[in-house]
Image (cartoon, rainbow, N blue to C red):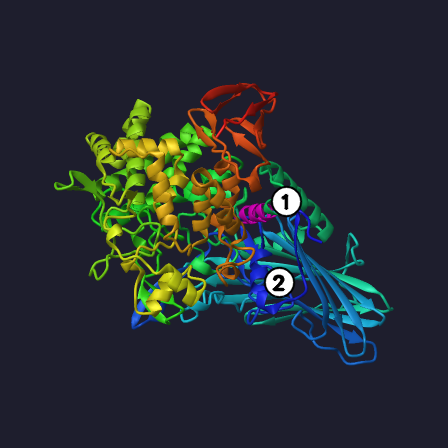
Amino acid sequence: MATAWTWSYEGYEPSKERLREALCTLGNGYFATRGAASETRAGGPHYPGTYVAGCYNRLTSAVQDRQVENEDMVNLPDWLPLRYRIRPAGAPPGPWLSPDHPYLVDHRQSLDLRGGTLTRRSVYEDGAGRRLTVEQERLVHMGDPHLAALHTVFTADGWAGEVEVESAIDGDVRNAGVARYRDLADRHLTGWETGTEPGSTVLLRCRTVESDITVALAARVVVASGPGAGGEAAAGRNHRVTPRQTPRSVQQNLVLPLDRPDAGAAVDKTVALYTSRDPAIGSPRQAAVSAVRRAPAYPGLLASHRRAWADLWQQVRLEVPGEPGRILRLHLFHVLQTLSPHTAELDVGVPARGLHGEAYRGHVFWDELFVLPFLNLHLPEISRGLLDYRYRRLPAACRAARGAGRAGAMYPWQSADEGREETQELHLNPRSGRWLPDRSRLQHHVGSAVAYNVWQYCQATGDTEYLYSKGAEMILQIARFWADSATWDDGLRRYRIRGVVGPDEYHDAYPDAMTAGLDDNTYTNVTAAWVLTRAGELCRDLPDIRCRQLLDRIGLDPAEPARWDDISRRLYVPYHRGVISQFAGYGDLAELDWDGYRKRYGDIRRLDRIMEAEDDTVNRYQASKQADVLMLGYLFSPQELATLFRRLGHELDDDTWRTTVDYYVARTSHGSTLSSLVHAWVLARVHREDAWAHCEEALTGDVADIQDGTTEEGIHLGAMAGTLDFVQRGMTGLETREDALWLSPATLPQLSKFRVRLRFRRHWDVDLRIGAERLRIAVPDDGPPGVRVVLGGHTHVIAPGTARWLDLPEG
């Protein structure tokens, strides 16, 4: 039975297996392995995959008579393979067994979120009535990021004989997890070498084709002294461990005696994975072999793994009652498996689909915008590490800006290893089978997201050292890009930013236009104004010596900040019919027959693909894929957003914002998992009664795979983290600014009671509990100062070692 800390599946359903593989992925921030059954190989309902954070390779493919480069997160050699078959006494061996075999009579799998393990139990019965029960537990070690293990127990029911086990490391893998990429080059590995070592250990080494990253895996396979026992038996006569090598794989065969009815035997497989990108090693091969030799027996590995998870859960406590809380815990589990404390030591960003599959090629988009706000208040060292990924690629962003004829830094929409633009030039519409131009690289608003993330991290942590060094350099260079992108329009008496694509993504050009891009996307312009404002403040607040060093380092003209201030006040924000326009000219587009399309197609989330297959384009219509203008309500509190608009010369009152929200809610197809999240966030403060439907869709987006097959290609990390932040900040109205926690709760009836523990400034365990009418804040007794809390216009100081109940403001 499912509990608050387990995620279980009863029975075996091939049609849902790839979805379950994604949701049962195990990882530790360094690498992750999909939850594929160890008995299976890639193909049909199965897709085993192992991915190391930041391990990319570039290949060239021929598409429509063009040579197209794509950089992918590489599917690495498969360490899982472990299959088995019955060898009855006095009878020939039976077939190799797997959940796909007709002998399967019972199957169950369970993900233990608290302990970070995946358990499978399968029961097989052959034609002679012989039953074999197989129970397997898997871990990817959260303490030692290079280790993983399988513990497999075989139990005979009513027969005696042997079980033959074949374990392998399979290097003959490719990136084949996304159907729409199948016509592209997918062989990322070469140079395979296999070998054996003393102590029942085998190894495989290979390298990536273009990036030349060496990858080494070593596996130790031993027979445990008994089912569930806490030791290992030496490989002796009865176990007959036989290694076998092929050019791209290495195998070990064991024969385990089950010499009496109801006898059992256990096999433990321990694996180490290293790459040449790892610090403090010489040879990846030797590092892997040494790690496997040092690794304790499975019970010791399991115990230390569980301790590491227990420590991690203590730092990220979020308690929500009922089924929403169970789903949120699963979301948090997958966030931590992708972005753990180990991640902070790596040169990696936030992969949009986690380390769970190959969709989006493992690229880094703007998803840290939805991930870092949660991490900032629990594991800020991870946030800082992820921001460092952006800082290391600041030179590449500056080169990209110069290549586009601009100053400053132009961050790419899709980033991978080098920080260059990795957005594909063509994308396939599966409905029409046509390859189409991909213009999403015009989403320059990703630069504003980087600046926003820097600012929010520093506000939450008080890390002025970072703000005044790397953070300031990124913010100022992004501000320079926006200032150089803005052009003056004498007719409007405003600055304009032309030729961009907003978060909506459906609209990438005007109808029948020969050039790509749109003018004055409101989200882009308003966030650019915010960046310019923050950059100006930084120039004023930086210590003099640091200011001179930084200005000299980036070659900033002393006159530039004054121009930033002018542009930040006079960027154009278009309106039509009393609502904020998504971009200039949006109100002139045709209205879409929403009811007609829903009647004809049912699910119209990917309206762009539907219309292109009809030889039409969404560019003609007032129809958005996801939140665009409304993203402003996600980034900024009502007060801050009103202040931003006032600075731009507009009064944004409640009625105008509510009208704008209603307008776009009716014209959005929610073709992105992020859309429902943002709509729930905004509606919680505008139309509370409508917010839960969007919140529920955000919660179930991956677990129910509401986008019909996308989750099996990798979970949506931004949406998962965003649901956590929806509770943490969206329901509490939490802001971290001016050395205080600002609260403005707007809970939903379905989420009216919860508890979250925060790490704010020097206090590691601020306990925040929300009820229907009151909230409680407790500050740990770890020394002064206390925590300032602003609620309903009143300031309260919670002294260390005390707790206060505060009444929620009416309305």
**Residue 727 on image: x %, y %:** 53, 39
- Residue extending farthest to the left is 490
Q: Which part of the image, by quadrant, shows the N terminus? A: bottom right
Q: Earlier in the sequence, mark 2 or mark 1?
A: 2
As helix, strand or loop, the secondary structure at mark 2 comes to loop
Please provide percent x and percent y for residue 176.
Answer: 48, 67
Given contact means CB atoms under 8 Å apart, are the residues at marks 2 and 1 in contact?
no
Q: Which residue range is magenta in the image?
A: 326-338
Give the answer, above or below, for where 356 lies relative to 263.
Answer: above
Horizontal arrangement in the rendering, residue 629 relative to residue 245 (left or right): left
User: Residue at coordinates 51% horizontally, 19% vertically from top-left?
Assistant: 796
Q: In the depicted view, which residue is nearer to us: 13 or 218?
A: 13
Dominant secondary structure, magenta:
helix
Q: Amino acid at mark 2?
A: Leu
Q: How many marks?
A: 2
**Eye-nearest disc, 2 or 1:** 1
Q: Nearer the viewer, residue 237 or 409?
A: 409
The residue tagged 1 is 322
